[in-house]
Image: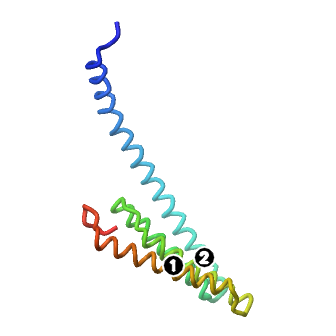
Amino acid sequence: MSPSPNEASKLEDIIEKWTVPIGNLFVSLFHRIALFGIGGATVWSAAVAFMEMTRKGSASIEDLLLLFIYLEIGAMVGIYFKTNHMPVRFLIYVAITAVTRLIIDLVNTRHEADIAILLMGVTILILALANAVVRYASFKFPTKSGDGE
């Protein structure tokens, strides 16, 4: 004897009542573990980079920009941990800083301006415009919780 559609619907509701919270718990646990892993790797990488700078006895502008990248990644992890929202602006800041490091590296190695540096400058301009759009959108269309992005 097969269950009636009403009984099957009740069984589905009971299963959903138990499985959805468990699934949400697993997703939340995964996020927390991943955030701790990313945060730990960021701190570790920043510490190794800093120790390398102290071993060298100096820090180049590229080294300092690398530390800023680690700082922004750490800030992103902290914000995501607290709010469960990915701050897209911070990703853009990391990208701008990384492209700036590339420009400095190219200038230091080639000692000449070329099309690659110009294209990277255009890339920074595009990223800056994207940041302006994100900031405008988050101001004009805030999230329901009111925390910006």
Q: Is residue 110 left or right of residue 21?
A: right
Question: Percent position (x, y) of residue 74?
Answer: 46, 70
The image shows a total of numbered marks equal to: 2
Q: On residue 126, which mark appears?
A: 1
Query: Regarding mark 2 in the picture, which secondary structure is present there?
Result: helix
Which residue occupies 31% across, 20% down?
8
Q: Position of residue 80 (x, y in %)?
A: 39, 63
Q: CA distance from mark 1 to mark 2?
A: 29 Å
Which residue sits at x=46%, y=59%? 36
Q: Amino acid at mark 1?
A: Ile
Side of 112 where 22 appears, left or right: left
Q: Residues within 10 Å of mark 1 (few under 14, many from 20)?
A: few
Q: Residue at x 52, y 73 (%)?
A: 70
Where, quadrant-wise, is the C terminus in this rendering? bottom left
Pinpoint residue 68: horizontal percent, then vertical percent.
51, 79
Q: Residue 122 versus residue 108: which sits nearer the camera? A: 122
The dot on residue 109 is none
Q: Is residue 35 above or below residue 2?
A: below
Considering every residue shown, the one lying at the far top of the view is 1
Position of 109 with respect to 103 (left or right) is right
Give the quadrant of the N terminus: top left
Q: Mark 1: which secondary structure? A: helix
When the figure is inspected, residue 105 is found, relative to residue 10, above or below; the finding is: below
Residue type at the position of mark 2? Ala
Residue with the mark numbered 2: 49
Q: Is residue 63 among what the camera can see? A: no
Q: Residues within 10 Å of mark 2 (few under 14, many from 20)?
A: some
Upstream in the sequence, badge 1 or badge 2? Answer: 2
**What's the colour scheme?**
rainbow
Q: Quadrant of residue 22?
A: top left
